[in-house]
């Protein structure tokens, strides 16, 4: 298989629009989980410590949270059909992409400095469809052509 065919297949799997997630963001990821024959939604809230391949169909984020005093990390593929929604709750000022140093820290030393952002604008994932020009109906085109021919005959 050529690379172009693989790229077309990958692009077909991409979601139309995803949230611009960055390292240091606190996010709520809603994920579909299958139990037997039923699906349910589960929310995982934590800090994004890594963002990989942002423009690719394999875009991935690693989210870390503390549950019962134990650090839990989960990796999510952003274009996966099992990831229903990613919502940014807080945004922090960080200077690197991989925040793996947070694994060694706890308490106050693990805090990140908050940054102001427009929460509604960032979490908006509605797709804007380009307006298609209004095409004329075939009957209208036929009538216009007939009128033009009549005008040409009267001029000649």
Image (tube, helix red, strand yellow):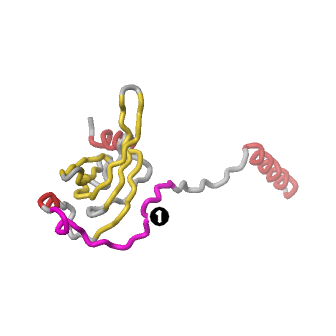
Q: Residue furthest right?
A: 154
Residue 91 position in % (x across, y down) = 33, 66
Is 1 inside the magenta-drawn segment?
no
Residue 38 position in % (x across, y down) = 42, 30
Quarter occupied by residue 151: bottom right
User: What residue did someone put label 1 on?
Assistant: 120
Secondary element at image label 1? helix
Is 121 inside the magenta-drawn segment?
yes
The residue that appears at 55% across and 56% down in the rendered structure is 130
Of residue 126 and residue 138, the one placed in the foreground of this image is 126
Q: Residue furthest left?
A: 104
Q: Is residue 138 left or right of residue 68?
A: right
Q: Residue furthest front?
A: 68
Q: Residues within 10 Å of mark 1 (few under 14, many from 20)?
A: few
The residue that appears at 31% across and 62% down in the rendered structure is 25
Q: Which residues are magenta?
A: 106-127
């Amino acid at each position: 298989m050529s690379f172009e065919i693989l790229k077309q297949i990958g692009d077909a799997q991409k979601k139309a629009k995803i949230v611009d997630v960055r390292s240091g963001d606190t996010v709520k990821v809603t994920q579909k989980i299958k139990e037997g024959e039923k699906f349910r939604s589960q929310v995982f809230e934590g800090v994004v410590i890594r963002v990989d391949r942002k423009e690719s169909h394999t875009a991935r984020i690693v989210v870390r949270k503390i549950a019962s005093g134990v650090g839990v990390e989960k990796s999510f593929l952003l274009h996966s059909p099992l990831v229903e929604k990613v919502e940014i709750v807080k945004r922090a000022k960080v200077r690197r992409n991989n925040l793996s140093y947070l694994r060694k820290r706890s308490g106050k030393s693990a805090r990140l400095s908050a940054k102001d952002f427009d929460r509604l604008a960032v979490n908006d994932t509605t797709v804007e469809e380009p307006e298609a020009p209004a095409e004329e109906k075939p009957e209208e085109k036929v009538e216009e052509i007939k009128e033009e021919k009549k005008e040409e005959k009267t001029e000649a």
